[in-house]
Amino acid sequence: DSGVTQTPKHLITATGQRVTLRCSPRSGDLSVYWYQQSLDQGLQFLIQYYNGEERAKGNILERFSAQQFPDLHSELNLSSLELGDSALYFCASSVGRSSYNSPLHFGNGTRLTVT
Amino acid sequence: AQSVTQLDSHVSVSEGTPVLLRCNYSSSYSPSLFWYVQHPNKGLQLLLKYTSAATLVKGINGFEAEFKKSETSFHLTKPSAHMSDAAEYFCVVSPFGYNKLIFGAGTRLAVHP
């Protein structure tokens, strides 16, 4: 068990809808990362927050947004959902602000299915 | 440009035989390198990391990897495969100065009795 908790485990919704994915980092970790894993794209970095502030941005669509709250949990909001958004969404956390010297610990993911 | 190439998409071994999963990387500066494992319906688990200390890195579950700068490789090995090692393995590079992980495409390891 990595100590990173993601809810829900599964989510099935229709195109055009909006969903929120939630992540609680390991105790003591200040950084939260969001990744998307799909069969055709592999693992893609979406966004990172460190202690409540956005620190790095990857291939995140404008329809997606995230935030990190004062208690350090994070939410990823996906809106105007399309079929192609179906994927496994991972949250990861780390102690430091850089992945260079602070390994990431991943949750078990939220599997999103858009129908 | 920063990139990671896992040279085999699938590797199949018999239980008790050695495992070799190959990874080459491209990075402008001295990177940190990681191997992660993903079992079905699970998240990614850190196996080991290289951060410019010893070139031979020991990880969990008997895995180890050797950093070879001249060959820009970071191959993962295990002397004797176990059935529970069947999973997908990802080689990951974190380039210095870039706050992101770059994942390889993954190698699916099958272990046969």
Image: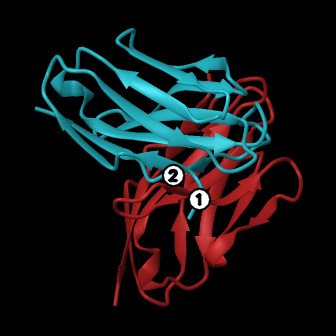
Q: Quadrant of the C terminus of chain B?
A: bottom left
Q: Amino acid at mark 2?
A: Phe
Count the numbered circles shown. 2
- In this rendering, the answer to whether B21 lies above or below B18 is above
Question: Viewed as shown, does residue B6 lie left or right of B111?
Answer: right
Chain containing the residue with disc 2? B
Question: Viewed as shown, does residue B110 lie left or right of A99?
Answer: left
Identity of the residue drawn at 55% across and 85% down? B80
Q: Which chain is red?
A: B
Chain containing the residue with disc 1? A
Instruction: Report x, y in % for residue A56.
Output: 63, 19
Instruction: Report x, y in % for residue B29.
Output: 79, 29
Identity of the residue drawn at 80% across and 35% down? B30
| Residue nearest the viewer, comparing A69 with B32 | A69
Q: Amino acid at mark 1?
A: Ser
- Using a 10 Å C-alpha cutoff, classify the residue at mark 1 as few (fewer than 14 neighbours), some (14 to 19) or many (20 or more): some
Judging by the rendered image, the residue that carries numbered circle 2 is B90
Q: Which chain is cyan?
A: A
Instruction: Report x, y in % for residue A25.
Output: 61, 44
Question: Viewed as shown, does residue B30 lie left or right of B89?
Answer: right
- Using a 10 Å C-alpha cutoff, classify the residue at mark 2 as few (fewer than 14 neighbours), some (14 to 19) or many (20 or more): many
| Spatial CA span between label 1 and label 2 | 17 Å
Where disc 1 sits, the SS reads: loop
Marking on residue A2: 1
Question: Do the residues bearing badges 1 and 2 touch, measured as CB atoms within 8 Å?
Answer: no
- In this rendering, the answer to whether B64 lies above or below B14 is above
Question: Viewed as shown, does residue A82 lie left or right of B91?
Answer: left
